[in-house]
Image (cartoon, helix red, strand yellow):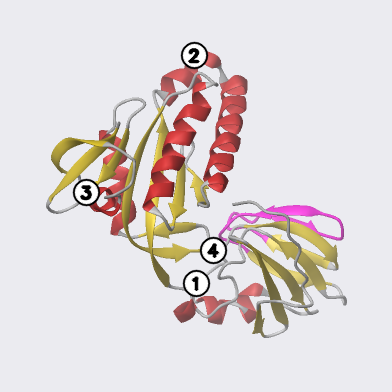
Amino acid sequence: MARLQRKRFSEPVDVRRFPRGRVDIIELGDTVVGRMTYEPGWRWSVDVKPIATTESCQYHHMGVTLEGRLRVEMPDGTELEIGPGDVFEIPPGHDAWVVGDAPWVSIDWEAMRTYGRPAGERRERILGSILITDIVDSTALASRVGPSRWRELLAQHNERAQRVIDRYQGRLVKTTGDGVLALFDSTERAVRAAAGIRESVLQLDLQVRAGINTGEVELLPDDVRGLAVHVAARIQDLAAPGEILVSGTSRDLLEGSDLNFEDRGSHELKGISGARQVFALT
């Protein structure tokens, strides 16, 4: 849930150090923000690659430069130099290096959950409830309203979904082009968020379907993965327009709540062994 708060980089919750660089970490609820400081001569492929164990930086960075200059190179050879006052976005798959004799200092609010940690420390598994939504007939709708109006609708859909997810103390993991994937530490809040998103986007003349499952997931910098996520996605595929479906596991965790469900039977889910019981929110 959003709340008024303030944190200082002089009192970080974590400091990640690597050759010629460091990242100071603060947390604002579920949002992790980092101050990156790279010394002259720093280069990702020299100083961070041995820690990351990937050929290029696989993090999606979004932030603002405070001091110094950084040059970024993408796999196709495209380069961009980032200097003081520049607000930047750097997609995964890049190399980068400090330009000149001054340190590069920036604030990053997108990639900081595990950036700069050794590969073996980045795999965090938690128990959570996954909510996946999808706009009904999105392809036909996009064709009917045209690209400009469709972009407006998507932006409004995403804003409304984010507000509802925040209200129920979830984390928007990512948007999916015509839906969202969110993570909750409460199954009940995940279901109520799904219902809230469904009602909120009706005002845009949009219908969504939703799937919810509860299980163990692995946290990645910009994503979550695991069997629980795949099950949620397959359950969402079964949902009719406007319908919210939950797995049997999620339904069992809601015993005693005031939420009501109808049994939708047992289903073989594509790519997942064994039949799964599915229930619809009523």
Q: Amino acid at mark 3?
A: Gly
Q: Residue at x 12, y 52 (%)?
A: 274
Tell me, for residue 149, which label it has, or none.
Answer: none
Where is 62 relative to 207, above or below?
A: below
Q: Position of residue 151 (x, y in %)?
A: 59, 28
**Mark nearer the N terminus (2 vs 4):** 4
Crowding near the residue tagged with mark 2, few <14, some 14–19, many ≥20 C-alpha atoms within 10 Å = few
Tell me, for residue 58, which label it has, or none.
Answer: 4
Give the distance between the C-alpha atoms of the residues marked 4 and 1, in whole angstroms. Answer: 8 Å
Where is 140 relative to 27, above or below?
A: above
**Mark nearer the N terminus (1 vs 2):** 1
Give residue 167's quadrant in the image: top right
Q: Position of residue 135 (x, y in %)?
A: 43, 29
Q: Which residue is more in the foreground, 83 or 129?
A: 129
Kindly identify which residue carries mark 2.
144
Q: Residue at x 57, y 42 (%)?
A: 162
Q: Amino acid at mark 2?
A: Arg
